[in-house]
Image (cartoon, rainbow, N blue to C red):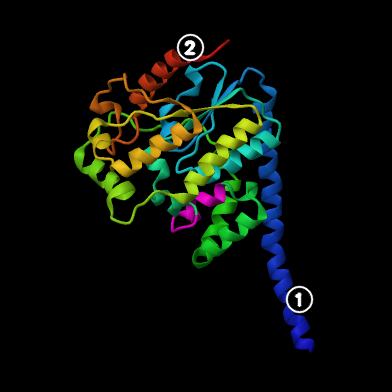
Amino acid sequence: MANIKVFIKKVSFFLSIPIILVSIILAFTNRKVEKIISGLNKDQSIKMLFMGDSHIQKGIIDSLIPNSANVAQNSESFYFTYFKIKKLFKSGVKVKSIYLGYSYHSISNYYEDFIFGQNSKFIAPKYFFILPNKQKIKMFVSNRDNLGLFVLNIIKDGLNPYNYYIGQYANKFKNTKANKSSMDKRLELQYLDGLNEISAINCHYFNAILELCRQNEVQLVLVNTPLHPYYKAKIPSKFVGKYEELIKIGKLQVINFNDLKLEPNSFIPDGDHVSSEGAILTTNELYKILNKTIVK
């Protein structure tokens, strides 16, 4: 019995160290993140948020659009965006419009790998502390084979608020251009490997985002950033059909840049994202569209 008590004391001491460290990190992180949210909240000039995954993160330069903030993150599925919007609304952030990245890949189940699959350990930690407890448990269960790395990434991301769930414009791709081999690999990953289907999870949370915005009287506008013509032409029809169906059911406005003609060097090799040069052209075109549609 004495040996057991000694063992329990040693284990408790051993566990208390990381718990204390994590608590300190979280307290520090929460202050920094809340400061960012407070900035969004207090800046009454910010009327619109650009949200979504790397397509928005790389494609929309918010500094070129007055009264806006780009808070997109790479590999951010609608699942994470929903809880992110919910957190921002709960924190008192008030905007008139959310411009949400929406493309054909957004509803492919390849994206579920970033939620509960192999890539969850790299993406989910950014959002871990804004998830409900039930979802946190799911994250631990889905990452049980990589639990140590998952926890380490939670701590690492917590030290960097701009690598946390808030997000910002970022595009380091310069002097690049789309090429067929890279586009074919991208298409294979997203649509064509024989296993990819429509994602029930992301369709559900897409509709949940729509309802959340309606409840808070925030306009939701979809933004489909430019795609290289070769890439776009090879997207399977079932994804195009579902993409259009969700728009129609939700009666949503979509900005799709069909009239914007970009050269190959306006894209990164995968043809699915614009380069930094392409981001300037895309943002300028978006600004023109917004000036025509926003009621001031």
Res. 217 image quadrant: top right
- Give percent across and percent down for residue 95: 63, 24
Residue type beneath disc 1 = Lys
Q: Which residue carries the number 2 mark? A: 291
Nearer-the-camera pick, 233 or 250:
250
Q: Main secondary structure of the magenta part?
A: helix
Q: Which mark is residue 9?
A: 1
Q: Residue at x 55, y 51 (%)?
A: 125
User: Magenta part of the protein: which range?
Assistant: 116-126
Q: Is residue 165 visible?
A: no
Q: Residue at x 57, y 41 (%)?
A: 208
Seen from the viewer's position, the closer of residues 191 and 60 is 191
Q: Nearer the viewer, residue 113 or 66?
A: 113
Is the C terminus in the top left, top right, bottom left or bottom right quadrant? top right
* In this rendering, the label closer to the viewer, 1 or 2: 2
Residue 142 horizontal side relative to residue 236, left or right:
right
Horizontal and vertical percent for residue 19? 69, 60
